[in-house]
Amino acid sequence: MRYAHEVDKVRTAERALMARLPEGTLMRRAAAGLAAVCARLLSSGREVGLGVYGAPIVLLVGSGDNGGDALYAGAGLARRGARVTAILAGAKTHEGGLAALRAVGGRAVPATDEAGAAAEIDRADLIVDGMLGIGGRGGLREPYASLAVRAADSGAVVVACDLPSGIDASTGQVDGPAVQADVTVTFGTYKPGLLVDPGARHAGVVELVDIGLGPYLPDPDVCAPRGDDVAAWLPRPTHESDKYRRGVVGVLAGGEAFTGAAVLAVGGAVHGGAGMVRFASSEHPVELVRQRWPEAVTTVIGDSLDQVGRVQAWVAGPGLGTDERAEALLAQVLATDLPVLVDADGLTILSRRRDLLWRTPPTLLTPHAGELARLLGTDAAEVEARRLEHVRRAAEELNATVLLKGSTTVIAEAERPVRVNPTGTPWLATAGTGDVLSGLTGTLLAGGLPAIDAAAAGAYLHGLAGRLSADPNGAGAAPISAYDVVDALPAAFRTLSA
Ligand SMILES: NC(=O)C1=CN([C@@H]2O[C@H](COP(=O)(O)OP(=O)(O)OC[C@H]3O[C@@H](n4cnc5c(N)ncnc54)[C@H](O)[C@@H]3O)[C@@H](O)[C@H]2O)[C@@H](O)CC1
Ligand SMILES: Nc1ncnc2c1ncn2[C@@H]1O[C@H](COP(=O)(O)OP(=O)(O)O)[C@@H](O)[C@H]1O
Ligand SMILES: [K+]
């Protein structure tokens, strides 16, 4: 698991640790870690390849300690022969850092010398962004904003110090231009903004440098599971397993208008490891599901679920419609004492029937930004801009575990750190992939996973299946269909059993 803490918690922990150490120790640790990553990038051959000696390096230096880190790291690189120029962009500059750089032959130019600064940036092999760290507030002011744009256009490798300037450390919000980093070297703990879009998109590969903060950090605000976390949660069949013990998932999906959603959700469930999938719907979707998934046990229903047989969890909503019959069926599912995943049309129904959510067993909602906006009475752009805030609010207000889909999928449950999904690809943004996710995740619920683990494991495997189907051998990506994602699920599972 990668753990992330909001700014206030980082500051409190830093204060506690600093009180026990000689002054400047933390900054030296941070700078040493940053310099080591820069040296590795310069020497790797893959990124720049010329080594540290003689390499033209530019430091973009802001007025705070983030600039101090960059200056000390730059001094370390200059000591190894790099040609380091600091562009001083803040109203003041960290004095010790600047003196250290100058002492080993580094140069400094003020950002007010626009032509000089631009020329330095254009000839740099590597740029260290030390403009803003956790002290950044709101959109970048000048000259930071122009420097961020210039750095992005330069072709140099950009390494962000602690976090890319212009992203909000605690939320990932980006307001206007922000540094686009190839690598971010972050200190002590991850920051939520490095894991959640739009901030995460700006961070590139994130490397964590240990500065000894661990013992002083409280519970994280956000965490991102790794493959071994997911592997540990997944149920595996044993010699004692039978189809009932592995978990029977009920899928209530599809109607006369939308049939594909049902076929895809059942596909996600079948390939998600269900002992059995029971599919309940009207005649036409049942016919189609039978043709495509003979494994599923189907029941044609009217407006009651009585004939369906026992299940351990329900998936309700994909293609179900939003009329009175659909509402009555959803109400029946939510009246059971079983875990229920609600998606798509089911969520639209819930936005007018929030009372259905006042139940004790686990409820997992899987909205995209538009559906969540309807549930919360806001608009989708607001949700997209502040995904963490909205997913947390939804979990509190809706008495449910909430998985918010999109460019970074985030999962919230009351009083738990938000889980951020690290897999996925924008190629998943195609109709029907959400239905696959709901079938898959519902199966994990039926297999006995707690809602938050089922959601995190489902999102992880779904994102991996998306990547594997879009770009199976790393040779280049191609468009995928939702069916391709179903087909790639076994390969995604296999990566976790190695
Ligand atoms: N406190 C500590 O113990 C440590 C801090 N470290 C570094 O210190 C950083 C935090 O340093 P600071 O607290 O000095 O804060 P920053 O260096 O992140 O920025 C603070 C300065 O930026 C200005 N500013 C804020 N928002 C702006 C905007 N949108 N546009 C332009 N200017 C803006 C502020 O007025 C202030 O002068 C961390 O991110 C990390 O890099 C590391 O050295 C590790 C140890
Ligand atoms: N920009 C993106 N980057 C990565 N994944 C995305 C992006 N946009 C959407 N997705 C993923 O694609 C899937 C789309 O689901 P959804 O919006 O419910 O579509 P549908 O209802 O058509 O199935 C979700 O898993 C979501 O996380
Ligand atoms: K920075």
Image (cartoon, rainbow, N blue to C red):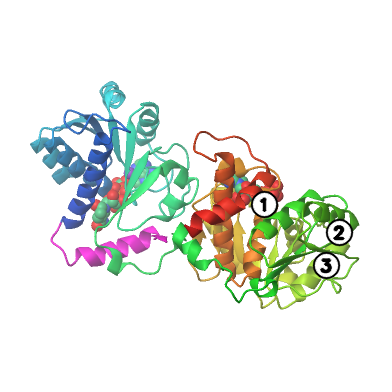
Amino acid identity at mark 1:
Gly
Q: Which residue is mark 1?
A: 434
Any part of residue 296 in sight? yes
Instruction: Look at discs 2 and 3 and give the one toward the viewer.
Output: 3
> Which region shows up in magenta?
1-23
Q: What secondary structure is found at the residue carrying circle 3?
A: helix
Is 175 left or right of 461, judged from the image as shown? Answer: left
Q: Residues within 10 Å of mark 3 (few under 14, many from 20)?
A: many
Q: What whole-number distance in Å separates the C-alpha atoms at marks 1 and 3?
A: 21 Å
* Location of residue 410 with respect to 20 vertically, above or below: above
- Please report whichever mark, 2 or 1, sits nearer to the chain's N-terminal start: 2
Q: Residue 159 magenta-drawn?
A: no
Does any atom of ligand 2 lie closer than 8 Å to the CB of label 3?
no
- Please report whichever mark, 1 or 3, sits nearer to the chain's N-terminal start: 3
Amino acid identity at mark 3:
Leu
Any part of residue 90 in sight? no
Q: What secondary structure is found at the residue carrying circle 2?
A: loop
* Location of residue 36 with respect to 119 vertically, above or below: below
Q: Residue 12 magenta-drawn?
A: yes
Does any atom of ligand 2 lie closer than 8 Å to the CB of label 1?
yes
| Cβ atoms under marks 2 and 1 closer than 8 Å | no
- Please report whichever mark, 2 or 3, sits nearer to the chain's N-terminal start: 2
| Disc on res. 329 | 3
Q: Which residue is mark 2?
A: 323
Q: Position of residue 263 (x, y in %)?
A: 77, 53
